[in-house]
Amino acid sequence: MTEQKIAAGILAADNEKRGNTLKADYEALGDKLARGGISIEAITDKVAQFFVAVPSWGVGTGGTRFARFPGQGEPRNIFDKLEDCAVIHELTRATPTVSLHIPWDKVDDPKRLKSHGDALGLGFDAMNSNTFSDAMGQERSYKFGSLSHTDAATRQQAVEHNIECIEIGEALGSKALTVWIGDGSNFPGQSDFTRSFERYLDSMKAIYKRLPGDWRIFSEHKMYEPAFYSTVVQDWGTNYLIATELGEKAFCLVDLGHHAPNVNIEMIVARLIQFKKLGGFHFNDSKYGDDDLDAGSIDPYRLFLVFNELVEAEHRNAENFHPAHMIDQSHNVTDPIESLIRSANEIRRAYAQALLVDRKALESYQESNDALMASETLKDAFRTDVEPILAMARLNAGGAIDPIAAYRSSGYRATVGKARPAVAGGSSGIV
Ligand SMILES: [Mn+2]
């Protein structure tokens, strides 16, 4: 029996209030879609089967380089974090797994963590290593890099840390390791591009060797930051080279915030799918850089266009296509639980809208070079208000018609605020 963090009565009462309106809206949308030959039930079923992992670091308040403003009832450790993640899944029914970060979520006994997850109905998604900051008591510093460091012993330490992440993940039932490094340089001439990339590849090969047969390894590129002049894994081209050099269990992870403004991310996604190297996503949104804002909060059309490529690949049964969906956000001014609820819904919204694209018509407009109608075909789908589909998918699965309203009426934040004393620090960050 799964332990419930939100009282069943509160959820039922909130759903009861909204049930009739949802039924009417769902029927109206169903009629509209049926006129275009689309079954609303088929779309609702697909949406209900679409899941995204919550990052453990996302349930704590984030921060910027300037300050961190802790919120009420912040999780003190990974056990508290899992409880917050359970709330998100209970209400959205879209987030059954959590992505952990080591060492932030390191515990003495991973089996205890696994049981805690089981009790809450949560599984474990990709493990994330951290060699972009120094852990307490660590022998060698990552100030000048980790997997690409000039010093062999520092590289070895970073390799061993990644192997430890795999071992913890094995105990938890995870099947993937995500590697993002902060390695790079701040000044022209500071490091040799070729030699540092060679060292990185050698280190990754050592980690890859230890990867269990049914695991995947994801490398995540990022244009800049923390290094401001050059970054070892700076773009999808380098990322593709890594995945190709390592082998068939290696894939590229696309973090939506890790590109220059205006970069055509959906096109990068299409290329990686075409060459069978798309590993998955870190969803978030941004205005300027790696802002880690809520998915779809700045540019929902871009999120839709990314999903348009994913649905297109699904539609044509693209080979080796099973991307991992994960959120990677940092919440500075909102209740992290609310931001993650909203993001999970926005990601499903983009998926639902992309499922509505008339692919036959689109292809025909593309072939006949009808630019306007091709563009309108996408906009038609994007303009459709799919909220009744999302709400019905949640309701059918035991979730909330309006998850944020149900969360607010539950008083969860105030309750944990009493049980969890305020902490000054906190294990969250930007990755
Ligand atoms: Mn990321």
Image: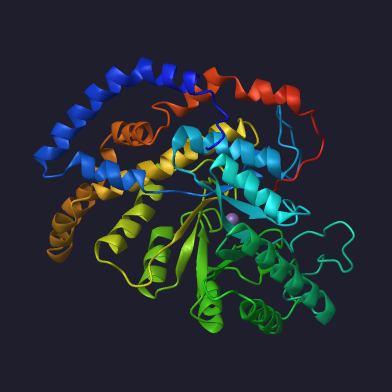
Residue at 70%, 68% in the rendered image: 162
From this view, report whether residue 404 is shown above or below residue 343. above
Q: How is the image coloured?
A: rainbow
Residue situated in front as seen by the camera: 300 or 93: 93
- On the question of residue 20 being in view, the answer is yes
Asked whether 394 or 369 is in front, the reply is 394
Of the pair 132 and 196, the residue shown nearer to us: 132
Position of 36 with respect to 303 (left or right) is left
Name the residue located 53 percent from the left edge and 79 percent from the top edge.
241
Ligand 1 location (quadrant): bottom right
Measured as percent of width and height from the top left, residue 20 is found at 28, 18
- Quarter of the image where the C terminus is located: bottom right
Percent position of residue 401, x then y: 38, 27
* Residue 186 falls left or right of residue 355: right
Question: Where, by quadrant of the figure, is residue 246 drawn?
Answer: bottom right
Q: Is residue 146 visible?
A: no
Q: How many marks?
A: 0
Q: Nearer the viewer, residue 270 or 89?
A: 89
At x 38%, y 72%, the residue is 320
Query: Residue 183 location, x and y as percent?
Result: 71, 68
Residue 187, percent from left and from top: 75, 69
Figure quadrant of residue 198: bottom right
Q: Please determine whether, in this image, residue 253 is positioned above or below residue 411.
A: below
Q: Quadrant of residue 197?
A: bottom right
- Is 393 positioned to the left or the right of 406 in the image? left
Considering only vertical position in the picture, is 340 above or below 109?
A: above
